[in-house]
Image (cartoon, coloured by chain):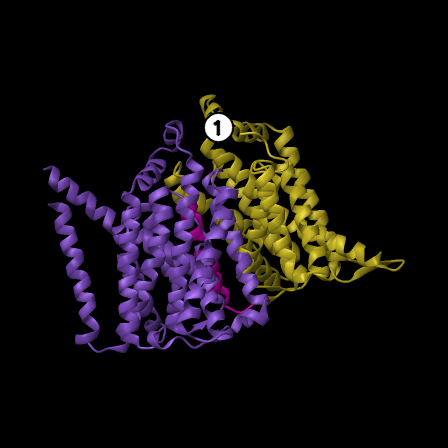
Amino acid sequence: MNKNRSMFMYGIMILFLLVIPFVYDSRTLLILLTQVFIFAIFAMSYDLLLGYIGIVSFGHAMFFGIGAYTIGIFMKRFEPTMSYLFIALLVTILLTAIISFFIGLLTLRLKSHFYAMLTLAFSGLFLVLAEKWRTMTYGNDGFTFRVPDFLKDRTEFYLICLVLMVLVFLVLRRFIHSPLGRVILAIRENEQRTESLGYNVLHYKIIASVVSGVIAGTSGMLYSISLRFVNTSVFSMDITLDALLMTIIGGVGTLVGAIIGSGLIEFAHHWLTEMAKTHWIFERWIIFFGIIYILAVMFFPQGIVGTLKRLRWRKDKK
Amino acid sequence: MELFFNLTLNGLATGMLIFLLAAGLTLIFGLMDVLNFAHGGLFAWGAYSGTWIYASTGSFFIGIMGAVATGMLLGWIIEKWMIKPVYGNHVQQILITLGLMLVLSELLKVVWGPNQISASPPDVLKGSWVIGDIIIIKYRVFIIAVGLLIFLIVQYILKRTKIGLVVRAGVMNKEMVQSLGINIHKVFMLVFMVGAGMAALGGVLVGPYSGVIHAGMGMEFAILAFIVVVIGGMRSFPGSILAAILVGLSGSFMAYYVPDLSLAVNMLLMAVVLIFRPKGLFGLKG
């Protein structure tokens, strides 16, 4: 009954989002919501790591950036056609899978600090690479590129992103409810016990980190397609911080939380950028996000969805 | 020969700066199991506050002292209000310190503006000595001397004093120390403050060395310090100075011969250490 109700709610939400571009004609809102969907995909991939297996990554921007640059380079160097888009997708999947596999193999057998540290260092390396490899990336300034025709229309792209977000949500949900996902949850709850039950913990952790990396790469692709421009900022710490904020404020380990968090943060972003015109302090909006983030981690570790769930659970018990 | 000598001196000086950062990280991690991602922020705060105090008082010594005091004060605030409430929850601690790192570097931009600030050494340390055809820049020698001095002092405290004994015992087994009636939380706070002070010292020294300071350099040095901590071993104090010198030297030589690869080489070094000796080259067991 409860499950049906929440599925019903999701259905209503998706329908609502599907109709928006046809009833409310606002370019700004459309672009903003597209960003929300893209970052929701990114945040869900992060949630898989932080919320479901308990791995802290500080370099998630790395996968995002790899996706963003791969599509950009392919569209710029070759023709902006469907087939090259497809090749770029394959290359992104391959690159992110290899890199996340490699980093996971190196550090996931050690304590959680190592993964956090190594991903931070690696994403720093990619940032430097994107700055220095000028012939390919045009350095700090980045470059604009053309996209295949069917992605040009804002409304269509909006719908594509929405569908992809729902798809990623369903796939990840399926993944978590699969036998493999159950083991992943068990690792979060008690690593030693899972290991002594005969599961190869490292194996499962690496699978989760590869899945997460690949999805993050895909969201990076969508991001640079939506801007038709890419520069080194896709590798910056801010992107990782966005993912962290979205998952933590929305609620870790819930997936829906990542989507809600993405909506909140993107709208807050938009709003604070508007405010920056009135007072300079709002240009340093990272401070506000940083402080909210620290307070959320300290006093509100379950996020919005987690807290709601707990409240409902209490009510049901009565 | 001259080139080799200069690159070595340069590498040693950079190594010492990284060591000041990595030493605090290692001690804090060894004792409290907290990997302090905000350490780079403390480094940058040391740089800005020290340079500012030096510029307004005209005394480099007061600048250094002011930076160390700022670092220790920030360390105290962070330990008391942010680390302690979530003690024992690693994921929360890692997440909080990263948030702090960002807040600290953004606050720098609010206080001192977003542009980089130039810094120069005091007159005594300006210029260089010339021996034969070798030119030795005074300020680099000064950094190396300060680094070594700090290493010796901390090493002396760790090995020869009561408090050092408690810290070393805490790194090995903190439950045991606590059950012997020692208030380990006071030790935590002290070590955190000293670590923060060392990071701030590194920060104030880096200004005249590189000529300019900017808010992003905290993160740059923090990444190098993480590499050092992994290579040297997460809990080993002597390991951190050796690894820092290694990373400093490789960085300086690589920056000369293959500039684009200098960070990549250090990363490769770290990857190799992680594959073959995940506890670090000089790490303790455990």
Q: Would you say residue B23 is visible in this rendering?
A: no
In x, y percent, where is residue B286? 53, 29
- Give the chain of mark 1: B
**B42 up-or-down from A70: above or below:** above
Residue type at mark 1 is Lys
Residue A273 falls left or right of residue B264: left
Q: Would you say residue A18 is visible in this rendering?
A: yes
At horizontal 59% and vertical 71% (from top left) the residue drawn is: A135
In x, y percent, where is residue A193? 37, 29
Give the residue at mark 1: B174
Q: Which chain is yellow?
A: B
Q: Give the residue at the far top of this rendering.
A: B180
**B182 up-or-down from A279: above or below:** above
In x, y percent, where is residue B235? 56, 36
Queried whether the magenta region covers residue A188, the answer comes back as no
Quarter of the picture containing the C terminus of chain A is top left
B116 and A30: which is toward the camera: A30
Quarter of the picture containing the N terminus of chain A is top left
Queried whether the magenta region covers residue B104, the answer comes back as yes
Q: Which chain is purple?
A: A
At horizontal 42% and vertical 59% (from top left) the residue drawn is: A217
Q: Secondary structure at mark 1?
A: helix
In x, y percent, where is residue A136? 56, 70
Specify start and end residues of the magenta stretch as a single range. B94-116
- 10 Å neighbourhood of mark 1: few (<14), some, or many (≥20)? some
At horizontal 35% and vertical 33% (from top left) the residue drawn is: A190
Residue A22 falls left or right of residue B285: left
At horizontal 45% and vertical 68% (from top left) the residue drawn is: A71
**Principal secondary structure, stretch drawn in magenta:** helix
Q: Give the residue at the far front of this rendering.
A: A83
